[in-house]
Amino acid sequence: MAAGGRPPLALLLSLPLLVTLFSSPPASAADDTIAANSSLADDETLVSAGGVFELGFFTPAGSMARFLGIWYRGIAPQTVVWVANRDAPINGTTASLGLNATGSLVLADQSGRVFWSSAPSNANATGAPVAQLLDSGNFVLRDGGGAGAAVLWQSFDHPSDTLLPGMKLGWDLTTGLDRHLTTWRSPGDPSPGDYTFGIDIRGVPEGFIRYGGAAPVYRNGPWNGLQFSGEPEMEPNNSNFRFEFVANASDVYYTFLVDGGGGGGGVVSRFVLNQSSVQRYVWPPGGQAWSLYWSLPRDQCDRYAHCGAFGVCDTSSGSPACGCVHGFTPASPRDWALRDSSAGCRRMTPLNCTGDGFLPLRGVKLPDTTNATEDTTITVDQCRQRCLANCSCLAYSASSIKDGDSGCIIWSSLLIDIRHFAYGGEDLYVRLAASDLPSNGDGSRKKNIVVVVFVSLVVLVLFGFGGFFIWNKLFRNRGRFQSTQRFNSFGSSIPLTPVQDRKLEDESGQNKDLNVTLFDMATIAFSTNNFATWNKLGEGGFGAVYKGELEGGQTVAVKRLSKYSTQGLDEFKNEVMLIAKLQHVNLVRLLGCCIHGEERILVYEYMENKSLDNFIFDKGRSAQLNWSKRFDIILGIARGLLYLHQDSRYKVIHRDLKAGNILLDKDMNPKISDFGVARIFGDDTDSRTRKVVGTYGYMSPEYAMDGVFSVKSDVFSFGVLVLEVVSGRKNRGVYSSGEQASLLSQAWRLWREGSAVALLDEAVAGAGAYRGSEVRRCVQVALLCVQERPDDRPHMAEVFLALGNPGAVLPQPRHPGFCSDRGSTSTDGEWSSTCTVNDVTVTIVEGR
């Protein structure tokens, strides 16, 4: 019977034997072994010889149950790496771990109830069995006390959620033992959760994270001799780690070793399945906390089959991330246009088996190999010939890249879950019909066609340049004069004529094709009933926003630049150019714009629930956002900000992240809006500005005081926003002077007192349907985001990981950097404020 089960008591031992175990001498608290007919009591532990690991009973945080487990000794907080009785918590009684004479470990209480037992050994024990905790973290049951004695059972064969150095993740094909990781149900409940990670040995072996034991969530690709195909981070020459993968007639498994070993004073590392992600943590020599080394999945392209069959996911290419292999087209163009690529791609030209060729895809994660075949004995050239001779073969690749490409993997079913890497990856050769190959060499006729097409294109380009030159000379100056005349009559009642050209005119003298839809003024006016008052949704720093309806019935939001706005043409162009290039589910979508005379208008998708501040700061409406929805909103904002900082074509700093700039659709999904003051950022260095724009209460100290901004400025604003969502209270307002008046200081005080949950909005707390652990985690992450020094704040990748993974180990926050309101609004619209971090008075131009 597998470890962790609850077998009938009669199959294990009789009640008299249990009584014997409870009355037998206990194991020494400083010992590392349990001898036959002895036991380990609830208040005792085993300690490995080198003092690396400890085995005993523990109670998870937030739980009353007791479990038998193994954890690192001397590392705080307690880090449990193995649990025996995951399915059978010990409640309302005490139990002990005993070793009976038949060679079985038994966890039972005095009444005879068995909570866990090791599997009966298939080997015939010849000596007195001994259980020993090793410095590797392995708890072994041996036939006798010698180090060379046969192992009857070991904890390494029955992992929980953690893989330690030397543990095997995979299969013993002789016995059918499948060693895989299973998540904890929650941080306070080590019972098996919904996610597993293990090696699938069908086809070519590779690792899968699965939900519910079946649905794939993530796949790491086949082993290529150096690393898994989908994990280029596994550097084969890493001085701290050594990765091994074994696949033979008796075993298929992955394992890793670290520098210095378990008790050698080197790097301490553990590999953990934490809900839907696998994470490697390290504790460097002399370290004070666990450090996240890497985490998978990394992004949307790591989601299994994100782009469907014959689709290729590539985050470096901007948005959308999905594309079709050359020679294929979206199977559902309408869904593809809506960013739903799950249907994948279909072949444009059927294969005919006789004239086909191969298209190389460089630097990719190889497709799902569950139904693929492998032959390690042939060359890649022989693999190509074998694929060509097999009409059902759709692609091939080398099975090993160690010491040059060798071996063969052949796919005869749909190619699923391909992604392109900026570095690393392998070469995949996809079969295409001859007509779809980029260069097919089918004789002089096709070459002549190419030449004719090329010459024609050259002539068209020359004519185009000539036409543009003539237009520029004859009409450009007149257009500028007319534009100046119109600008001087902003309030004029002269009818406006539609825009004829399809490019946004830059009044500084440059034309830029922004690749956005340009609406004429008549369409905009008609859609809003000529900007009728009853269609007005609100007003911000840019101007008024109106509800409109286009001819096809599509509802839109029309934002019209006010002549009194502090923002002008620069902000308008900045927003159009940025949003046109950014596409993400948590960013508001720009449908088009209109520039006509003095008019500057932006057309967005319509958000039924307006902005976030309409809910969280309104006592009458705040109850509509329960904790689950608030937490989803926080995750959505984090996801959108992560895209701006890391995953988009450009690194973008928003610079005005606040509740009023978070819009909510009909399903309350958050979308970041208002990019008028956003900046494209080239690297991780700081930038300065003489014009500090943004909203008081959300700006980081270094930005408000010195004009220094970076991605960490947005992180600070996000931290403030999270605290506002949790508390339902603004960080900006007229409060009494003093540190205790601000939201940040209140959150810091409650955190220090251990009462972070008390910050929760009364409308949510009164309902009672919330998770205290999630509230505390949100407050902790928010306080880490609002640290005074930018270097102390996490990046958004770390923030999103911390929010989405309850088991992630977080550092303790320090005193936040915050500004308390000591003044009032001046007549010229500027705020005078004092930052408590160093008592320097600054003036902040508020652009919203």
Image (cartoon, rainbow, N blue to C red):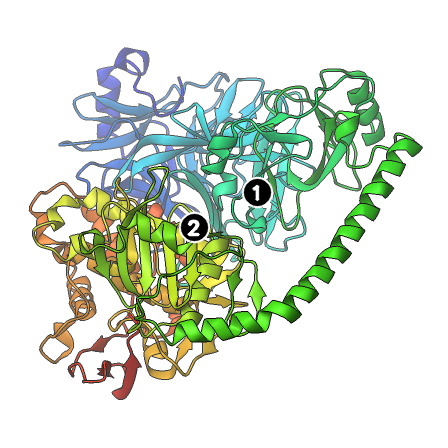
Q: Position of residue 835 (x, y in %)?
A: 25, 82
Q: Which residue is mark 2?
A: 52
**Does label 2 or label 1 sit earlier along the sequence?**
2
Residue at the outermost top position? 10
Question: From the image, which quarter does the N terminus lie in?
Answer: top left
410 left or right of 166 in image? right
Q: In this view of the protein, which residue sits in the foreground, 508 or 238?
A: 508
Residue lying at 25% horizontally and 59% vertically, measured from the top left? 659
Q: Which mark is residue 166?
A: none
Splitting the image into 4 quarters, where does residue 74 fall? bottom left
In this picture, is 709 found above or below 241?
below
Residue lying at 9% horizontally and 49% vertically, measured from the top left? 763
Answer yes or no: is residue 259 visible.
yes
Q: In this view of the protein, which residue sits in the foreground, 818 or 197?
A: 818
Q: Position of residue 114 (x, y in %)?
A: 25, 22
Q: In this view of the protein, which residue sits in the foreground, 230 or 82?
A: 230
Residue lying at 73% horizontally and 19% vertically, measured from the top left? 351
Residue at the outermost right position? 444
Q: In this view of the protein, which residue sits in the foreground, 372 or 823?
A: 823
In this picture, is 298 found above or below 485?
above
Label 2, secondary structure: give it.
Answer: loop
Q: Residues within 10 Å of mark 2 (few under 14, many from 20)?
A: many
Q: Which residue is mark 1?
A: 256
Do residues under tags 2 and 1 come within 8 Å of each other at their CB atoms? no
The three-letter code of the residue at mark 2 reads: Val
Residue lying at 48% horizontally and 72% vertically, measured from the top left? 482
Give the number of marks: 2
From the image, state whether disc 2 or disc 1 is nearer to you: 1
